[in-house]
Amino acid sequence: MDDLTREFLLESQEGLDRMERCLTDLETRPGDTELLADIFRSVHTIKGTTGFLGFSRLEALSHAGENLLGLLRDGKLAANPEIVSGLLALMDILRGVLRSIETTGAEGESHQQDAAMIARLERLQSGDVSVAEAEPAMAAADAEAAHPIRARRPRAPRRPSRPPQDHQSAPPPADSGEAGPPSDLEAAPRDPEPEPRSVPAVAAASRPARPAESSPAPAPEPAASGPSGTADSTLRVDVELLNRMMNLVGELVLTRNQILQATSTDAGFATLGRRLDMVTADLRESVMKARMQPVSHVFSRFPRLVRDLALGLDKKVRLEMEGQETELDKSLLEAIRDPLTHSIRNSIDHGIEMPDVRLARGKPAEGVVRLRALHEGSHVIVEVHDDGAGMSIEKIRQKAVERQLVPLQRAEQMNEREILQLIFLPGFSTAETVTSVSGRGVGMDVVRTNVEKIGGKVEVDSRTGQGTVLRLRIPLTLAIIPALIVRSSGQNFALPQGALTELVHLSAGETDARIEHLENAALYRLRGRLLPLVFLDRLLRQSLREGATPCDIAILNADGRRYGLVVDGLADPEEIVVKPLAAVLREIGLYAGATILGNGEMALILNPGAIAQSAGVGLSAESEDAVDDRRAGQQDFLLVEAGNRRAALPLETVVRIERIPRSRIEHAGSRPVLRFEGTLLPLDDAASDLVDPNGDPEAQTTIVVCRDGQRHVGMTVSQVLDVTGGRQLQEAGTGAVADGITLLHERVTAIVSLSAIPPIDSVAGAPAEFSLPAEAIQ
Amino acid sequence: MSNTIHSGPTQEVCSVVVGDTLYGVPIAHVLEILGKPATQPVPLAPYFVGGLVHYRGEVLTAVSLRRLLGMDPAKTAEDVLVFENADGLFGLFVDSVGEVMHVSDADHEPNPATLEARRQALFNGAWKLKDRLLVSLDPERLDPMRLASAFPAAA
């Protein structure tokens, strides 16, 4: 393939991408002339170049599209869903041909398809919506019915003077005397081709108008090459080259480190070394930046996807996108494309209900899928949020048991969060029937695997009747990840921070006492819960530690498996550059790669998920243990000060702690509530006392968001004091376990009863709908 | 200087020493020689993998000739030869790298039939020098991928 063709392919694909974006926008803003001009330009550019390169199929197709778009651009025709569908279908064919050129170097042949497409576009040009999708033969059958059909006839000969020769069966116009629909008349002059046409009489009738009509047409064409204003200052670079540069920069960083060490004593060299240091850091940053692209590159194809899916399922769905400018490493962007597509499909197929169902539930008929990207530390969060039916915890539990993914007994013990995690198991699907969109049992597990492959994480949160949020946490760059360096048997290993939840240090004297054994299984009691332990040195069959030595436990959460990895010691956290391992070492399975540390030493990067699997750490181990220690009467509490009293909140119910301005507390009826991320959070009574209309609007208060069964409630506290283990107290004499109090720090403390906070609907008289604005309740 | 007995077509080989034996690797295959680089062992790796070495921003898997031949581990740091294979690059640990020699094709003889099977598979005959033998090593036979399938669980 020559350079010219390659350039053309790239350019055309970009043009089509842009066109796709614009087309779906067009549906919401049918009259936007700028959009239309943009789409027109894309198609026009393709047509222009194809003619030059001799791709006749592409030329004929884009020509037909251009004619229709010309009408739209000039306002002679208004965009409607049929037209957009037609143009989208055209784009798919164009893409197909481009692909064929890319792989085989030739356009491939499909005259029938092309002719049908061109005919469809022509029908759309006549503005005849009702038969736009019908077969030409059918259209002819009821030809006597209406004007538009008659008007359509003379058009047939016009376009196809190009390749599909067989299409050129020009019937002479029958209705020359009649002024057809205006769209028809003006369509003729729009055609910018200088080709000699058998211009029918109908065109002759409008001839006087033509020169005036056609002159504006070429005007925007210089602009077609115009958008290169930015193109001139940018350059396409092979990703391979960027990867290579990234590698070399990494090498340079290490060399710099060594030079800095070697020259630290010489003053002259030290200055030079510092400059080298700065230049290297800048260079590294620049190369990394060169690899970044805005997420809009991936988002841009979703409007089309949502539109097509919604149409196919007869649902009404609106896609809202936020944070499109958020940038992500190119390779990561590619990696999240499929998981996101999958999640959006799921949201529309399983999440959003049929319009009548939604209306019956008091929601607007149109469902909303919100796609949001934002930066959070060294991660980018991409959220897929839908306001659909949400997931039924019970249904998931049932399904998981049915599919034998978890034993019945275990499923019954799992809490809500753990149940939701089950959807990520391979082979899980709650769809009643398999649709073309989803329900084949591959889905969420693929999403999770793909995201975890790039060091990301997937979280799901769902409320029945209110919707589902899927959050993908993606590291900023694939090449560089934050990691904790741990040591085992004198060797360095890098532990990706993404899986790390906390660290526990055991001194030499503690190891024997704190690490418990159940037969062969080593366990550690973390806040009352038993956590399976994996000894890195034993797992890797390194020389074992002797006697009681201090150790560190890295508490990891990988693929929903929680365990503690016991290592000899910890070094500093470091941003590491991931280097791939040779195939023979990848096969070991426990390593995600290797890296070169700042001091020049090498370290293997551990794969926490694979370690859990190889050590046999199960998904459910945690929940079983949780039940065990509840029985033993050990429970952890968040110790808070509310009012002037100390109170205890069971730690397992605590979702998060928020600082908010007091002015945000509102009332629904007499109940204090807090609007929170689009949901309404009922607060405890004490919150009412904090509301003081004359008080300082900036005054803050602390809210502990807790889980009470299926719902969330907020508890206002003046101070969070501690997390501590509490013991049950027994009533003297009867030995009955005292309810509602516990012993914390050797003081009897009341446990807050979350169920005492009444639900909103019981006071406001209206169901607390997801979409219901708080004003409506007040 | 020539170590050869006969004249005729010659080639340059890089001589390396492992234990008491002198080996020769055609210099055309050698990308680079790393003098006693820092190495990182890989727990659970196939027995023939000596460890990882850092080479120009890449982490190379290096095969240990000592381990392949079932010899005791080296007491001191080893040199590494860098080769290219289909998978990328790989290294070969040897005790030390010697001089480059010119050897004549006419002096080359195939492996003797009496040679132990594993060595049969690894060695590519030998050149007869004036006073000793120079065992020919073919980097293709030392490719870790190939070794993994040729000697799955040996030693």
Image (cartoon, coloured by chain):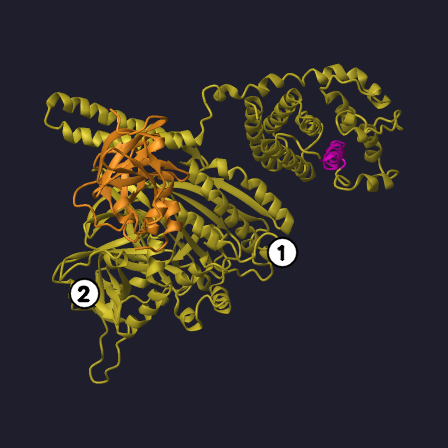
Q: List x then y, in percent, for residue B100.
A: 26, 29
Query: Magenta segment range?
Result: A110-128
Q: Quadrant of residue A87?
A: top right
Q: Chain of mark 1?
A: A
List the residue tagged with mark 1: A356
Q: Secondary structure at mark 1?
A: helix
Q: Quadrant of residue B78?
A: top left
Q: Secondary structure at mark 2?
A: helix
Disc 1: CA contacts within 10 A as few (<14), some (14-19) or many (>=20):
some
Q: Colour of chain B?
A: orange
Q: Is residue A454 above or below residue B10?
A: below
Q: List x then y, in percent, for residue A637.
A: 25, 64
Return the disc, 1 or 2, that comes first in the chain's sequence.
1
Q: CA distance from mark 1 to mark 2?
A: 59 Å
**Is residue B26 or residue A444 the one in the foreground?**
B26
Q: Residue at x 74, y 14 (%)?
A: A211
Image quadrant holding the C terminus of chain A, namely bottom left
